[in-house]
Amino acid sequence: MDCSSTPPNHKEISIMAGFNKVILLGHLTRNPELRYTPNGTPIASFGLGVNRKRRRGDDMKEEVCFIDIVVFGTQAEHCAQYLTKGNGVIVDGRLLQRRWETEDGHKRSKHEVMAQTVRFLPKGGHATDQVERPSHEPDGAPV
């Protein structure tokens, strides 16, 4: 909206949509677990550790944030097939909160990232434009 224009009528104001985007670079903290929905959709889940170094006085401190990642479809099968604990990945997705109630009535919730894309990093852990999967995949393997 142009700041010099007259204020809009209250009926013209639209609600702004939210923006939910997460990009993480880290290493798997556990091997992916592959399962299937009742209709056969593959789902893989794995833990991701994202390190951050910061200076505290003269010391360097390293903090690790642990995030659960969920990925669906063919990409889930590829993650389960080619990734193992310690592999580096770039995850692009959205933040999701699951809520449930335990059998004894306690309410629980959990945040996780629903991945739209998982980019495999080479063993050294550095991203390159050409790398889409580990180099140990056979030629012609699906991405």
Image (cartoon, grey):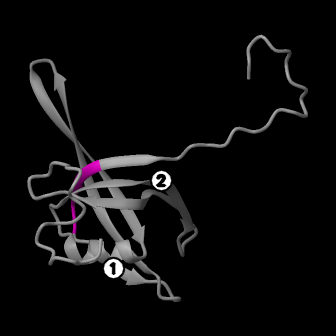
Q: Which quadrant of the structure image shows residue 36? A: bottom left
Kind of residue sitting beneath label 1: Leu
Residue 77 spot, x, y in % from top left: 33, 78
- Number of residues whose C-alpha sits closer than 10 Å to that of mark 1, classed few (under 14), some (14–19) or many (20 or more): some
First-in-chain label (2 vs 1): 1
Describe residue 28's horizontal placement relative to residue 70 as left or right: left
The answer to whether residue 53 is above or below residue 90 is above
Instruction: Please name the predominant secondary structure of the magenta segment in the image.
Output: strand
Assess disc 2: are there few (<14), some (14-19) or many (≥20) residues with their C-alpha within 10 Å of its C-alpha. some
Question: In the picture shown, does residue 9 fall above or below 100?
Answer: above
Q: Which residues are magenta?
A: 25-30
- Indicate left or right for 82 with 14 as reference: left
The quadrant in which the N terminus is found is top right
Q: Quadrant of residue 75?
A: bottom left
Name the residue carrying label 2.
94
* Badge 2 amino acid: Arg
Describe the element under mark 1 as helix, strand or loop.
Answer: strand
